[in-house]
Amino acid sequence: MKIYGFLAEWLGGGLQNLIRRFESARNLKTGRERASSFSIRIQKIFDYDVGVAMLTKLYSENPNPKQIEAIVKTLREGGVIIYPTDTVYGIGCDIHNQKAVERIARIKGVKPEKADFSFICRDLSHLSEYARQVPNPVFKLMKRNLPGPFTFILNASSKVPKILESKKKTVGIRIPANDIVAAIVEQLGNPLLTTSVHFDDEMIEYATDPELIHEKYAEMVDLVVDGGYGGIEFSTVVDCTGDEPEIIRQGLGILEF
């Protein structure tokens, strides 16, 4: 019955009173969980920013440039976002913002120096900035299979340890076949640091349905990009640091040699 009371206040012009009551509820120690859940519903009903992640709808066939610009602004300000790829949804940030990198590490429950984060690039044109001594056969293999659902593990350049503040000697490179994340990276001007949204086999919908992803991560990230339902298969991981490329995780991508 309480929700009907709230709606009645709104219909009677009491939106400001409603918001004040919500803010008060939010500060009650015993009601934090209830206020958090209610904040998402209020945002959806009134499009009112109450301190949780925004949910932005984009269409992969033709991403809206103004929305892309707003997403990139969030990244440049140190924001953490969730976005669609050609496999599962990803969590990412600007690779040059260390605080954002640390936030993602906390979300994943790992230390930044031990995290297996990858870089999402727009194309292979700046590969030499993040990987060193890429053999020509490896470059041709990547060019043949990208964009696509692959993560190529390469020997890292001297930039990578500085970005991740670790002694990491390898870097994962992703170029997803997804126009939304491609537009974000192109507008940003440098790669996204990325990791996959975590999910349990029994809770697959919380990794595929953008609205449920938003519900789960609303107070952990700054923005969730709704690009439609995501997949449940991860990328195929190809280790290219040895003498021959080796598939160390078979995922969605079928590698063409």
Image (cartoon, rainbow, N blue to C red):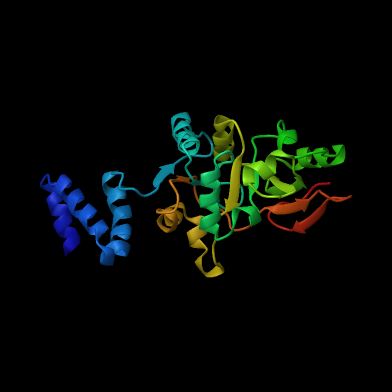
* Horizontal side of residue 231 vs 133, given as left or right: left
Residue 132 is drawn in which quadrant? top right
* Horizontal side of residue 2 vs 101, given as left or right: left
Give how far across and how far down residue 95 sits, in percent.
59, 41
Q: Nearer the viewer, residue 220 or 70?
A: 220
Give how far across and how far down residue 1 sits, in percent.
16, 65
Q: Nearer the viewer, residue 225 or 117?
A: 117
Residue 29 appears in the rendering: yes
Give how far across and how far down residue 153 sits, in percent.
75, 49
* Residue furthest left as drawn: 12
Q: Residue at x 43, y 58 (%)?
A: 216
- Above or below for 203 versus 221: below
* Horizontal side of residue 23 vs 137, given as left or right: left
Give how far across and how far down residue 54 sits, in percent.
39, 45
- Above or below for 231 versus 93: below
Residue 200 is drawn in which quadrant? bottom right
- Above or below for 85 versus 26: above
Residue 147 appears in the rendering: no
Q: Residue at x 60, y 53 (%)?
A: 112
* Horizontal side of residue 108 vs 127, given as left or right: left
